[in-house]
Amino acid sequence: MESADLIYDPTEVGADLVVLCWISQGPRSEDGSFDPQPSDVVSVTDADGEDLWARVIRRDGNRVWVQLDVPGVAAAPASVSV
C-alpha cells in the first residue's frame, strides 16, 4: 500500500481483531472526501509501517472501529488436542 487511510495501534487490537482508529490522526485527515462508513474496506497501518486491509464496523464522528484482515489468521484451521 502506498498510503494508508487510517493508523492503528497494534497494542489496542482486541481478540476479535477490532481496533479503534481516529480519522484526525490518520494520513487522510485533511481529505474532505474521506468518509468511511460501516462495511467499507480501508487500508490501515501502524507506526512501523505494517499495512493491512480492514473493514469498518462502526463509525462515530472522528472515531472509526475497524476489523483487521490479518492474512492467515481467519483461514488457519483450529488445532485440536487429543
Image (cartoon, helix red, strand yellow):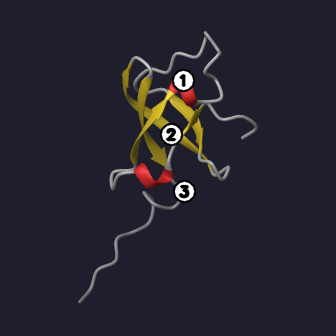
Callout 3 crowding tier (Cα within 10 Å): few <14, some 14–19, many ≥20: few
Is the residue under label 3 in contact with that under label 2 (CB below 8 Å)? no
Residue sitting nearer the eye, 77 or 7:
7
Q: Quadrant of the C terminus?
A: bottom left
Give residue 75's position: percent from left, percent from top: 45, 60
Q: Residue at x 52, y 25 (%)?
A: 23
The numbered dot on residue 13 is: none
Q: CA distance from mark 3 to mark 1?
A: 27 Å
Q: Is residue 7 above or below residue 15?
A: above
Residue type pointed to by label 2: Ala
Q: Name the residue furthest bottom.
A: 82
Residue sitting nearer the eye, 9 or 74:
9
Q: Residue at x 43, y 28 (%)?
A: 64
Callout 2 crowding tier (Cα within 10 Å): few <14, some 14–19, many ≥20: many
Q: Is residue 10 above or below residue 41?
A: below
The numbered dot on residue 71 is: 3
